[in-house]
Amino acid sequence: MAKLAAIGIMCKAPRPGRTKTRLGAEIGVASAAQLSACFLRDVAASIESIPQQFGRKGYGVYAPAGSESELRDLFPPSFDLLLQADAQFGNVLHGAVHNLLTMGHDCVVLVNGDSPTLPPSLLVETVDTLRRAGDRMVLGPASDGGYYLIGLKHAHRRLFEDILWGTEVVAEQTLKRAKQIGLESVVLPEWYDVDDAETLRWLHDELAGRSDRFRNGGAAAATRACIAEMTKAAS
């Protein structure tokens, strides 16, 4: 499987009340789940927009077990699913990198499923960077202090240990771990996750062309249609 990058979307089945709970508190659990499903469709579409000859394969890295049929309805037929369930998020990430590399991919890029306008160009840049000679990590810092993307060509467990997951220091701590083990880090431009009312406003602004902070994002066709439908129903 020479020169075939694995690009995995970290996700769970978009079920009302069990996904996007902060957003659900603002817009209702059913609407939050509907948006989450559209986000996954759009991140997958960004991956699919990368030409096949570039060498890439899309995955849904998911939990819980038993949600396969829900996710297969959201992802393109070319995507495979990889169950990666663990109470510790660091183990989930490390396990996904390890398993995908073991399957023969030359590098692994893990992206979150909450950034529907993630520019495909950042995915291409990540894989190109990983394919240069030498070992390195590519990290895409998120506006909340986490990261929306991590790219690796070796499964360095230390990168996922002793991290305060869900806090504003995740990206900072991950970069420190890389330095501790002597791993080169390449940092991408900042992007954002849509998790709450504030970041949902950012999404509205970006889609309307009003954002000064986030530009040249992906098409997000499913999310655009979903928001238009919700707006129409509310009017």
Image (cartoon, rainbow, N blue to C red):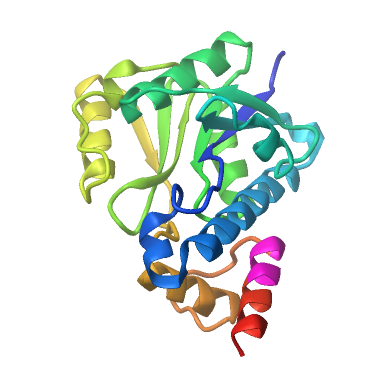
Q: Position of residue 222 (x, y in %)?
A: 70, 62
Q: Specify the segment rendered in magenta.
A: 221-226
Q: Where is residue 223 in the image (x, y as percent from the top left)?
A: 64, 64
Q: In this view, does 144 lie above or below 25?
A: above
**Quadrant assignment, res 48:** top right
Q: Is residue 154 above or below residue 194?
A: above
Q: Can residue 226 be seen in this snapshot?
A: yes
| Image mark count | 0
Q: In this view, does 189 lie above or below 106?
A: below
Front residue of this view, candidates 9 and 13: 13
Q: Can residue 219 be seen in this snapshot?
A: no
Q: In this view, does 176 lie above or below 30?
A: above
* Residue visible at 34% across and 30% down in the picture: 89
**Main SS type for the magenta part?**
helix
* Residue visible at 36% across and 60% down in the picture: 22
Quadrant assignment for the N terminus: top right
Front residue of this view, candidates 176 and 166: 166
Asked whether, in this view, residue 25 is left or right of residue 58, the answer is left
Residue 134 inside the magenta-drawn segment: no
Quadrant assignment for the C terminus: bottom right
Asked whether, in this view, residue 35 is left or right of residue 155, the answer is right
Asked whether, in this view, residue 223 is left or right of residue 210, the answer is right
Q: Position of residue 70 (x, y in %)?
A: 67, 39
Front residue of this view, candidates 112 and 27: 27
* Residue visible at 57% across and 61% down in the picture: 35
* Residue visible at 52% across and 84% down in the picture: 210
Q: Which residue lies furthest to the bottom in this view?
A: 235
Q: Where is residue 133 in the image (x, y as percent from the top left)?
A: 52, 21
